[in-house]
Image (cartoon, rainbow, N blue to C red):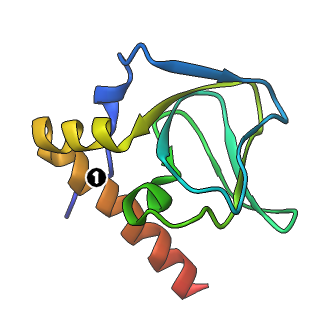
Amino acid sequence: MSLPPNFNILNSDKNVESFSAGQKIFESGQVGEEMYFVKSGEVAIVLDGKALITLGAGEIFGEMALIDTKIRYANAIAKTDCEVVAINEKYFNFLVQEHPYFALNVMRVLAERLRKKTES
């Protein structure tokens, strides 16, 4: 049995961005140059006005657009006041090199979300 994804290495990251409840973090149609780690608060991923998922502290979002360099398909909106760590491609590559389990954890998140989507 595999362990759930763990991104605790990002908890000590000082490159934190703050968003107020209701504020957009990114919009659908934008080129995704960063993925995000939720340090505190909650973020809703919204498509056509419908919340697809709400993410909390310790979770990531926006990883697909960073990995495949495509446009974002949904909006990310701060559901509560929140703090996130932005991870650009250079930082992502550093994390993968220095912490190989980081990449595995990102893949686990992608696989879990794909599985939930195909099972519903």
Q: Quadrant of the C terminus?
A: bottom right
In the displayed structure, does residue 110 sit left or right of residue 28?
Answer: left
In the displayed structure, does residue 77 sit left or right of residue 104?
Answer: right
Q: Residue at x 41, y 13 (%)?
A: 14
- Examine the image and state in which quarter residue 84 appears: top right
Q: Nearer the viewer, residue 41 or 77?
A: 77
Residue 60 pos. (x, y %): 47, 45
Residue 6 seen in the current view: yes
Q: SS for tag 1?
A: helix
Q: Is residue 18 above or below residue 94?
A: above
Q: Residue at x 39, y 59 (%)?
A: 109
Q: Quadrant of the N terminus?
A: bottom left
Residue 5 pos. (x, y %): 32, 49
- Examine the image and state in which quarter residue 102 appears: top left
- Examine the image and state in which quarter residue 46 appears: bottom right
Q: Which residue is mark 1?
A: 105
Q: Residue at x 82, y 30 (%)?
A: 21
In the displayed structure, does residue 45 sit left or right of residue 97?
Answer: right
